[in-house]
């Protein structure tokens, strides 16, 4: 490795770390207070970096929000993996209760709930939610192209997101409910709305 290459390597690592710090701070801000109430300066201050770096890495506040959504999608894929129908209630309960590997899963769901006011970012958010509903239909042995089945899956998602919202508002006993506590009611909900197909 030449001296020039050796000098470039720490810069690449620093750039990646800075970008991740901005994403983490932005996700917390967007999930907690919403898109409109979040300023890029607040995000940069929380990340401990110069605000100009948001433009460098994400172009704009809208670009930062879209990157946060993409990051949230990847995290959901990692934490849910291949969902089987039997495991759907527990998977949703774990996400709603915020018991993902890094404890940020409910933050991801809150981010998906927040409208940005930017059509491009909101289109990504809607696609993510639609894709997740289609995965639920497929896990139940249904056809993801069946609009009625997708509607029922979206109702399951809407109810799950509602639990996240109510927990964030401090409503008891939802706030104190563990993933195990939530799994039973969610199992009843999923069973009522998503009927598994043969072998599901």
Image (tube, rainbow, N blue to C red):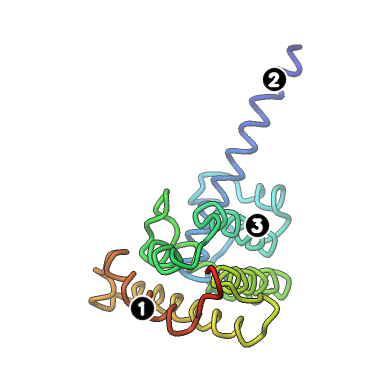
Reading the image, the residue beneath label 2 is: 7
Residue 15 lies, with reference to residue 80, above or below; the image says: above
| Residue 16 image point, x, y percent | 63, 38
Q: Answer with left or right where residue 5 lies relative to residue 198.
A: right
Mark 2 nearby-residue class (10 Å; few <14, some 14–19, many ≥20): few
Reading the image, the residue beneath label 1 is: 166
Which element type, helix, strand or loop, lies under badge 3? helix
Work out which quarter of the rendered image holds the N terminus and state it. Answer: top right
| Residue 176 image point, x, y percent | 24, 68
Label 1 or label 2, whichever lies nearer to me, is 1
Q: Residue furthest top?
A: 2
Image quadrant where residue 63 sits: bottom right
Q: CA distance from mark 2 to mark 3?
A: 28 Å
Mark 1 nearby-residue class (10 Å; few <14, some 14–19, many ≥20): few
What's the mark number on residue 67?
A: 3
What's the mark number on residue 35?
A: none
Question: Can residue 20 be seen by looking at this rendering?
Answer: yes
Q: Tell me which residue sits at (73%, 55%) in the image.
A: 59
């Amino acid at each position: 490795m030449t001296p020039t290459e050796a000098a470039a390597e720490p810069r690449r690592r620093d750039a990646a770390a800075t970008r991740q710090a901005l994403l983490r701070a932005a996700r917390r801000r967007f999930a907690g207070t919403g898109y409109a109430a979040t300023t890029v300066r607040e995000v940069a201050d929380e990340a401990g970096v110069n605000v100009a770096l948001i433009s460098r890495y994400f172009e704009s506040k809208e670009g930062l929000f879209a990157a946060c959504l993409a990051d949230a999608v990847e995290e959901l894929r990692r934490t849910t993996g291949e969902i089987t129908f039997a495991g759907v209630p527990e998977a949703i309960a774990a996400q709603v209760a915020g018991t993902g590997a890094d404890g940020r899963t409910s933050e991801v769901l809150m981010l998906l709930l927040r409208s940005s006011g930017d059509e491009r970012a909101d289109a990504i958010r809607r696609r993510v939610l639609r894709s997740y509903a289609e995965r639920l239909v497929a896990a139940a042995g249904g056809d993801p192209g069946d609009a009625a089945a997708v509607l029922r899956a979206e109702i399951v998602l809407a109810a799950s997101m509602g639990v996240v919202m109510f927990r964030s508002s401090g409503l008891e006993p939802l706030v104190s409910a563990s993933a195990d506590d939530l799994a039973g009611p969610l199992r009843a909900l999923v069973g009522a709305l998503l009927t598994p197909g043969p072998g599901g």
